[in-house]
Image (cartoon, rainbow, N blue to C red):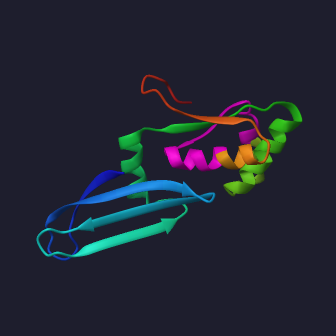
Amino acid sequence: MTILKRQCDSCKNTIDIRVGQSVFNGELLWFASYSCPVCNIEIEEDGKGAAPEEIRQVLLREYGIWYLEVRESGKRALMAAKFLGAIVNLSNLEILKLRHKIPGRVMMGTQFEMIKLDRILKQNGFRSLIQKINKLETHS
């Protein structure tokens, strides 16, 4: 969980909104909540799937960028690319581009976005792993 600074919708006081992500039963989940000490409004918001971009960016800054590496080759690499492409709704062209990255790093995102994909791949017999990107690494 991390903190997002914003103004209270009711009284405009600066508040700390607690935000986070998790994976539960194969679903990517996110949350945001706050309690304003000035006007006493309390708000809880939860969702499935991708977090709103503002929350996602705060999580990336706080916990770093993570990548998913698929460790397959040959026919299995193509199968993994098609499987992953179906999960994240890629076009055929994007799946082909993804295939050329396998074996190797195929996607980047928040820790829990990558955990979800890694778990699904492993549950379906594909070899994969996730790791945090070192700040000193260059990205292609």
Q: Which of 56 and 128 is in front in this view?
A: 128
Q: Position of residue 85 (x, y in %)?
A: 73, 51
Q: Nearer the viewer, residue 52 or 112?
A: 112
Q: In this view, does 45 lie above or below 122?
A: below
Q: Report the quarter where the C terminus lies.
A: top right
Q: Residue drawn at (66%, 55%), measured in percent from left and top?
A: 88
Left or right: 30 with respect to 39? right
Q: Pick out the residue farthest to the right.
A: 75
Q: Residue drawn at (17%, 75%), measured in percent from left and top?
A: 40
Is 104 included in the stretch rendered in magenta? yes
Quadrant housing residue 7: bottom left
Left or right: 14 with respect to 67? left
Is 130 included in the stretch rendered in magenta? no
Q: Position of residue 36 (x, y in %)?
A: 18, 69
Q: Give the range drawn in magenta.
A: 97-118
Q: Is residue 116 visible?
A: yes
